[in-house]
């Protein structure tokens, strides 16, 4: 991260923190899908040592904005699927393998085969996946969207830093957002606008 990016990221972290507090203070019952289980609460942030241990174990460096979110805003939460976030909430970091079929430590360091902006007719065949391959390598699960769909964060590969939805046996669908924090803030904006759903 360059010196120029550091103040911008700090400002974004501060803005997201303020919006999350506003969402938690909204009167009445929340209307956004999935928020009833976490009520806009997150668990305490992870320590730098905990994040470094995760990165070393899996041979990856987490995208800077997601890393700062975990160490400054929060991690996991009170709901059965984690804390404040899209869908049923953000999973804790140790739930990284929720969307995977084969949860081996080195799977995060293997590039995710999908690319943003590319349409796939037969995703499995076009990216060279066999029945024995882990299709969601290089990604960590962010949360359950329902009906077997997950939001994931690409940590290795051409789409590093991007969030996408991975439906079972279908091609991934990338969010329009350039990174995790933009995706998360867009969700908060939808919450604050009184919207019921988020994609």
Image (spheres, rainbow, N blue to C red):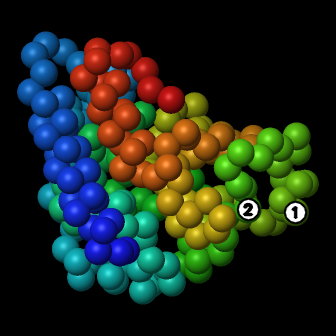
Identified at 49% across, 35% down, the residue is 145
The numbered mark at residue 113 is: 2
Percent x, y for residue 190?
34, 24
Dots 2, 1 in contact, CB < 8 A: yes
Percent x, y for residue 49?
24, 82
Percent x, y for residue 58?
49, 80
Q: Is residue 63 above or below residue 21?
A: below
Identified at 46% across, 61% down, the residue is 96
Q: Is residue 56 above or below residue 63?
A: below
As drawn, the residue found furthest toward the front would be: 4
How many marks can you see?
Answer: 2
Looking at the rendered structure, the secondary structure element under dot 1 is loop
Is residue 168 left or right of 154 when viewed as pictured?
Answer: right
Identified at 37% across, 67% down, the residue is 64
Measure the C-alpha gap from mark 2 to mark 1: 9 Å
Which of 76 and 70 lies nearest the eye of the viewer? 70
The residue that disc 1 covers is 128
Identified at 71% across, 55% down, the residue is 115
Quarter-wise, where is residue 147 in the image? top right
Is residue 155 left or right of 90 when viewed as pictured?
Answer: right
**Label 1: how many Cα within 10 Å (few below 14, some 14–19, many 20+):** few
The numbered mark at residue 54 is: none
Q: Earlier in the sequence, mark 2 or mark 1?
A: 2
């Amino acid at each position: 991260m360059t010196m120029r990016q550091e103040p911008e990221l700090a400002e974004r972290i501060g803005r997201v923190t303020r919006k999350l507090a506003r969402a938690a203070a909204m009167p009445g019952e929340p209307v956004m899908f999935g928020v009833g289980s976490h009520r806009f609460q997150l668990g305490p942030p992870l320590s730098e040592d905990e994040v470094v241990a995760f990165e070393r174990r899996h041979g990856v460096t987490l995208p800077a904005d997601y890393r700062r979110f975990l160490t400054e805003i929060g991690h996991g939460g009170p709901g059965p699927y984690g804390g404040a976030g899209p869908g049923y909430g953000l999973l804790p970091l140790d739930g990284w393998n929720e969307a995977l079929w084969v949860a081996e430590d080195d799977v995060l360091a293997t590039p995710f085969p999908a690319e943003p902006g590319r349409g796939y007719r037969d995703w499995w065949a076009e990216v060279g996946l066999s029945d024995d391959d882990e299709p969601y390598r290089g990604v960590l699960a962010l949360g359950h969207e329902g009906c077997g769909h997950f939001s994931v964060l690409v940590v290795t590969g051409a789409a590093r830093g991007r969030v996408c939805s991975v439906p079972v046996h279908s091609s991934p669908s990338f969010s329009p957002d350039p990174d995790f924090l933009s995706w998360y803030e867009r969700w908060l904006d939808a919450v604050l606008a009184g919207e019921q759903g988020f994609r």
